[in-house]
Image (cartoon, rainbow, N blue to C red):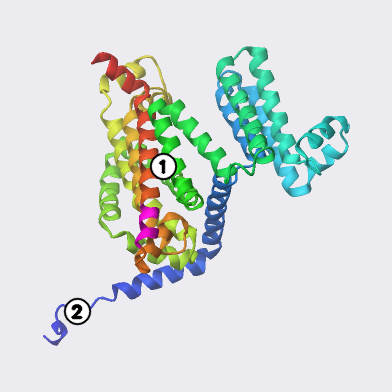
């Protein structure tokens, strides 16, 4: 009976986990490097935009919004414009193709703008974005597609550019942080448009408070990290939830995995994340994705499963394909439930900011962690207040999008 002694026998579970991680890193180290580079680029780009928005970035965003608004009505011209614009951006980044085109253009096209804004050279990416924006506006005007929305986007872009020019060029000595003021106005306007004037006014006051306590840069770093992690989590969670809603076997396999992801302490996720991606924002994003993803999967599955079977059968009776039933019936009817899952993903992601700050992700989490480690109550309190403001802003914004879904409007009308 000596084989029973000692009982219970020790199982080298930790060593096996470490050996498995080492095997993964040895065989898929290049893949992890690519993933880490992409995540770091996304967080850095979004953080730079939120802290120091550039005219080029704003122009590209305005063009992307117009493309989304117009693509369903006139897909061919819009896709041609989008494809050409992307090709020019890639050509500029790779071969400086935009510089070549600008240098061979008539000087009258750009000299007046250079003199107006005090620029020494033409920004080729800005020119590409403006040309794409103008082309999309022309498509909308010719085919008379959503003219009020197109005018609002184009006019809003022009107003923001002029506002930024005035803030930066005319009265920089009056406003201490013109970049923060500009982005604060943009976020407050977004809240006003999406959720109404109450959230718009709250955002204006609350974000001004964040600027006043000198936590704006940290708050925008945290917002960038949360948005990138939430986007990755949603992109992974919604397809898994759809498959789980269609397949009982997949649902039974996924549920214990989700239970494990939700019950395991968040610090545990940092161990493999740091091993694969070292310190910085990337392991914070990875741990946040793992921690925040389960509600997105569960509520997507729930939203699709709770749709009345008679509605689906009616679509099948009219000859709709399974894909058309999914995109035209099930997803629209389940949108409010799915958006509730997205809301939970964002809130759980925001709850990870302090833990992410402990591994070098920066932002408000780092401020709170430093306040705790240094016993600096003022620093920790300011960071905590900024986290609360971001949480309220994101929660109310996503809740407003949920309330505006077709199913939610139909339920309110029926009530």
Residue at the left extreme, as displayed: 1
Q: Residue 404: within the magenta?
A: no
- Residue 25, percent from left and from top: 48, 67
Q: Mainly helix, strand or loop, the magenta region? A: helix
Would you call the spot at circle 2 few (<14 residues within 10 Å), some (14-19), or many (20 or more)? few
Up/down of 177 relative to 58, above or below: below
On the image, which quarter does residue 249 sit in? top left
Q: Name the residue under label 2.
A: 9
Q: In this view, does 248 lie to the left or right of 163?
A: left
Q: Nearer the viewer, residue 411 or 308?
A: 411
Query: Which residue appears at 38% of the width and 63% of the height?
Result: 371
Query: Which residue appears at 83% of the width and 37% of the height?
Result: 101
- Residue 245, percent from left and from top: 31, 36
**Label 2, label 1: how many angstroms apart (C-alpha)?**
42 Å
- Magenta residues span 377-384
Q: Which of 407 and 189 is in front in this view?
A: 189
- Residue 257, percent from left and from top: 29, 52
Q: Name the residue under label 1.
A: 234
- Residue 12, percent from left and from top: 29, 76
Q: How many numbered discs?
A: 2
Q: Can residue 154 be seen in this view?
A: yes
Up/down of 331 relative to 95, above or below: above
Q: Is residue 243 visible?
A: no
């Amino acid at each position: 009976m000596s084989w029973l002694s000692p009982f219970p026998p020790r199982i080298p579970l930790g060593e096996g986990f470490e050996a498995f991680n080492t095997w993964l890193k040895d065989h898929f180290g290049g893949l992890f490097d690519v993933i880490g580079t992409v995540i770091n680029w996304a967080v850095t780009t979004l953080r730079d935009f939120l802290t120091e928005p550039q005219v080029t970035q704003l122009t590209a965003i305005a063009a992307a919004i117009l493309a989304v608004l117009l693509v369903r009505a006139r897909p061919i011209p819009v896709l041609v414009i989008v494809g050409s614009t992307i090709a020019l951006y890639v050509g500029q980044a790779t071969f400086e193709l935009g510089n070549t085109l600008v240098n061979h253009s008539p000087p009258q096209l750009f000299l007046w703008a250079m003199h107006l804004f005090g620029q020494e050279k033409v920004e080729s990416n800005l020119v590409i974005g403006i040309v794409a924006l103008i082309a999309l506006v022309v498509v909308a005007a010719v085919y008379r597609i959503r003219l009020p929305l197109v005018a609002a986007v184009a006019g809003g872009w022009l107003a923001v550019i002029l506002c930024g020019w005035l803030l930066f060029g005319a009265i920089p000595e009056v406003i201490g942080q013109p970049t923060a003021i500009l982005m604060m106005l943009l976020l407050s306007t977004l809240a006003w448009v999406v959720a109404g004037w109450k959230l718009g006014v709250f955002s204006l006051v609350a974000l001004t408070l964040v600027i006043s306590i000198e936590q704006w840069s940290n708050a925008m770093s945290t917002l960038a990290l949360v948005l990138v992690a939430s986007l990755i989590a949603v992109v992974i969670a919604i397809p898994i939830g759809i498959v789980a809603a269609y397949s009982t076997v997949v649902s039974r396999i996924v549920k214990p995995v989700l239970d494990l992801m939700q019950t395991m302490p968040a610090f545990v996720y940092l161990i493999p994340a740091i091993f694969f991606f070292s310190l910085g924002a990337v392991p914070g994003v990875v741990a946040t994705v793992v921690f925040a993803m389960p509600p997105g999967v569960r509520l997507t599955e729930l939203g699709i499963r709770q749709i009345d079977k008679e509605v689906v059968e009616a679509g099948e009776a009219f000859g709709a394909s399974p894909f058309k039933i999914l995109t035209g019936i099930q997803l629209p009817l389940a949108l409010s439930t799915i958006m509730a899952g997205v809301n939970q993903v964002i809130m759980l992601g925001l709850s990870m900011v302090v833990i992410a700050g402990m591994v070098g992700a920066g932002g408000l989490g780092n401020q709170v962690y430093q306040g705790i480690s240094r016993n600096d109550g003022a620093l920790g309190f300011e960071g905590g207040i900024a986290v609360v403001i971001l949480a309220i802003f994101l929660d109310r914004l996503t809740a407003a999008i949920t309330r505006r879904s077709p199913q939610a409007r139909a339920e309110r009308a029926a009530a």
